[in-house]
Amino acid sequence: MSAPAEYILHLADNAVVLGQRNAEWCGHGPILEEDIAMGNVSLDYIGQARLLYQLAATRLGGDATEDKLAYFRDETQFRNYTLLELPHNGPLVGYAVSDRDYATTVVRNFLYGALMVLVWDALEKSPDADLAAIAAKSLKEARYHLHHAADWLVRFGDGTEESHRRAQAAVDHLFPYTEEFWTPSVAEDAAVAAGAGVDVRSLRAAWDAIVNETLSEATLVRPQVRGYVPEGKHGRHSEHLGYLLGEMQGLARAHPGATW
Amino acid sequence: MYTQSFSVPDNAGQKNVAAVPSTENPELMAAFDARIDADGRIEPQDWMPEAYRKTLVRQISQHAHSEIVGMLPEGNWISRAPSLKRKAILIAKVQDEGGHGLYLYSAAETLGTSRDQMLEGLHSGKAKYSSIFNYPTLNWADVGVIGWLVDGAAIMNQIPLCRCSYGPYSRAMVRVCKEESFHQRQGYEALLVMMQGTEAQRAMVQDAVNRLWWKCLAMFGPPDADSPNSAQGMRWGIKRISNDELRQKFVDATVPQAKVLGVTLPDPDLKWNEERQHYDYGQIDWQEFWNTVEGNGPCNKERLATRVKAHNDGQWVRDAALAYTRKQQQRAQKEAA
Ligand SMILES: [Fe+2]
Ligand SMILES: [Fe+2]
Ligand SMILES: [Fe+2]
């Protein structure tokens, strides 16, 4: 029983896109220790992405490689959650320019981290041994990411007036994007059907519990969410992914066939 | 790293370092001198002359600032790294440099200067950092060349500092040097792969070497004849080998590596001198070097302003952490009462 490549690509794309985003803080962190910690988080995500793309490449066969999958697939082929591609600021259009906001970074890492400790925990038990091995490694990392983000979220929520305001604004901005977690994609359904995936709907109660507990400790309010459900994992993205991939893939695409 | 800073006074340009007249207690001074002469280590709790303390704080904090500012030129290529493996290596490297900054700030703090004070020196433009970071990184090969040559030059300079007379600094250097050697090998390996690649890749490497070679030679600091701080530094075991000697060692080690790589070092005067048993090399443009040290190089303003902006933008984050800790302490006190 092995998970289909499309499902592994969804996991890999999540990791590479968030790793790319978090690495933007390198050299610009709010304090040196945090600069290093965020670099660590980013490095974990890039490491996960590499393992997952390598596995997907094996399953796809042909001339697929880790880097072909990361660098030579277009925006509509990327299967990451929309949440992960957003820039580190409030709601702005794709070509807007803004200062990065650490509260946005922390809230996103928290919301996604809370999901991934559950996903990897389930996948660690997957009969797909290759995927289970990656899940076991990633679970340890995800626990650290969640812990790190939750700590900062509580400090922000229960810190100063400004940090509380920024954290609440980031929660309000990002929360609607988490709706995408709970509607399975074709690839997720296929992984479940193959007996190698996890039904995301079964994780919702546990995710709610983690999120509600931390938000309440942080004295932050969970917003009501209704309306539009993002569809990044179906390949329909926000305006932001094109810019992210343009930057990430540009050099590699300028030299197709080159080895680095 | 990054050694040019070690022999540049913070008020660089006005080269007027007069010897500080010693008003120290003669007995303590004699004991201190004896320990230095015996190649012993000075530890934070030991008595030391003020001038020694000041020189060390200046040197270590300049080194720490260099690590932190040095994150920026390479950070410039993280988002565009052309493979995931190279991206991971680069993130890890930049993160290591941040770690070096952290140990070095801690080592300087043992001398009674806080990190905030040191950062204030950097941000106000008073404290220097290595000028090599004031040049732009213009193509991907710059990342490899920085590893090979800049980390390489840093190692040349820092290996002797592993035996520096101040304990916390020498111990920090042992750890830092191990990681810098790793960076150097990784940088060189990345360049080897590029040189075996396409024409365009080889051109990138040559372009990066052309731009960075002379700047790396200048990293060792002004010629010994113009280096007023060196004698005192040698006496104190803070500096062990002169600028020119280190520079020569670097050239001698690098020329064969460049040959293996297949790049040309941009110096027509570079050639083996049978008599000296060293490579001769051409004239370094010291005017350009001092311009850059004094703040008028191509990227000084961008580098410094970026550090200042990160610090200012992060103020609310640090404030939040402090406020939260204070609240927690108050809650704990209330519970205890
Ligand atoms: Fe260094
Ligand atoms: Fe370093
Ligand atoms: Fe280094």
Image: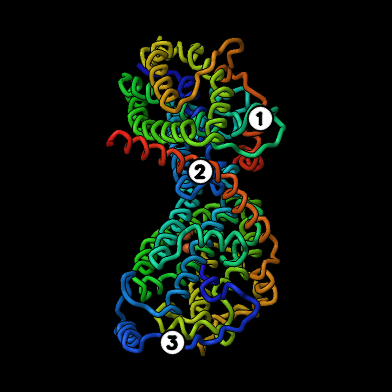
Badge 2 or badge 3: first in the primary sequence = 3
Residue most extreme to the left: B336
Chain letter of disc 3? B
x, y (%) of residue B172? 38, 63
At a point 29% along the width and 79% down the height, the residue shown is B40
The residue where tag 2 is placed is: B319
- Look at label 1 and name its amino acid: Gly
x, y (%) of residue A20? 55, 37
User: In the image, is A92 to the left or to the right of A179?
Assistant: right
x, y (%) of residue A18? 52, 32
- Please, is residue B121 above or below residue A49 in the view? below
| Element on which disc 1 rests | helix
Q: Quadrant of residue A127?
A: top left
- Look at label 2 and name its amino acid: Asp
- Please, is residue B201 above or below residue B111 in the view? above
Q: Is the residue at mark 2 from the same chain as the one at mark 3? A: yes
- Please, is residue B84 above or below residue A200 in the view? below
The residue where tag 3 is placed is: B23
B101 or A250, which is in the foreground? B101
Quadrant placement of the N terminus of chain A: top left
Q: Give the CA distance from mark 1 to mark 3.
A: 66 Å
Is residue B224 visible in this depiction of the protein? yes
At a point 36% along the width and 31% down the height, the residue shown is A143
| Element on which disc 3 rests | loop
| Element on which disc 2 rests | helix
Number of dots carrying numbers: 3
Q: Give the CA distance from mark 1 to mark 2.
A: 35 Å
Q: Is mark 1 within 8 Å of ligand 3?
A: no
